[in-house]
Amino acid sequence: MNYVRIAADECKGCRLCVQNCPNNCLGIGSEINQMGYQAAVFKNPNCTACGICFYVCPEPGAVTVYKNEERINA
């Protein structure tokens, strides 16, 4: 299974990952994180682990991509 893990406390809710995901796998959650932002959340099992979300995210460590349950970015 492919999926994306968003570190909610690192995310500033810029929506770059949400807007750039080709499979609409990410959305903005309803909860407010400790910095006062609504963080992105993984919402769709159609993830291909393309990594676009990782590359467009301006926050280091906020996005981790897993392909077949193996981490593919560091």
Image (cartoon, helix red, strand yellow):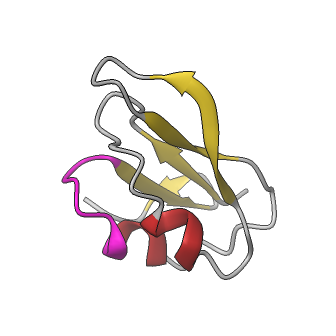
Q: At x 67% / y 75%, what residue is drawn?
A: 48
Q: With respect to residue 24, does 41 lie above or below?
A: above
Q: Is residue 53 magenta?
A: no
Residue stretch rendered in magenta on the structure: 55-62
Judge by depth and name the residue closer to the eye, 63 or 13.
Answer: 13
Q: Is residue 54 above or below residue 69?
A: below
The one nearer the camera, 73 or 46, is 46
Image coordinates for residue 31, horizontal then vertical, percent: 57, 22
Q: Taking 17 as reference, is 41 left or right? A: right
Q: In the visual, does 35 lie left or right of 65?
A: left
Asked if the stretch drawn in magenta spans residue 56, the answer is: yes
Magenta stretch: helix, strand or loop mostly? loop
Residue located at (80% from left, 67% from top): 46
- Give the quadrant of the N terminus: bottom right
Image position, residue 20 (x, y; %): 54, 78
Splitting the image into 4 quarters, where does residue 10 fall? top left
Please tell me which residue lies in front, 9 or 68.
9
Location of residue 23 with respect to 70 vertically, above or below: below
**Which residue appears at 33% of the width and 75% of the height?**
55
Q: Residue furthest front?
A: 36
- Residue that extends furthest to the top in the rendered view of this protein: 34
- The image shows residue 34 at horizontal and vertical percentages of 32, 17
Quarter of the image where the C terminus is located: bottom left
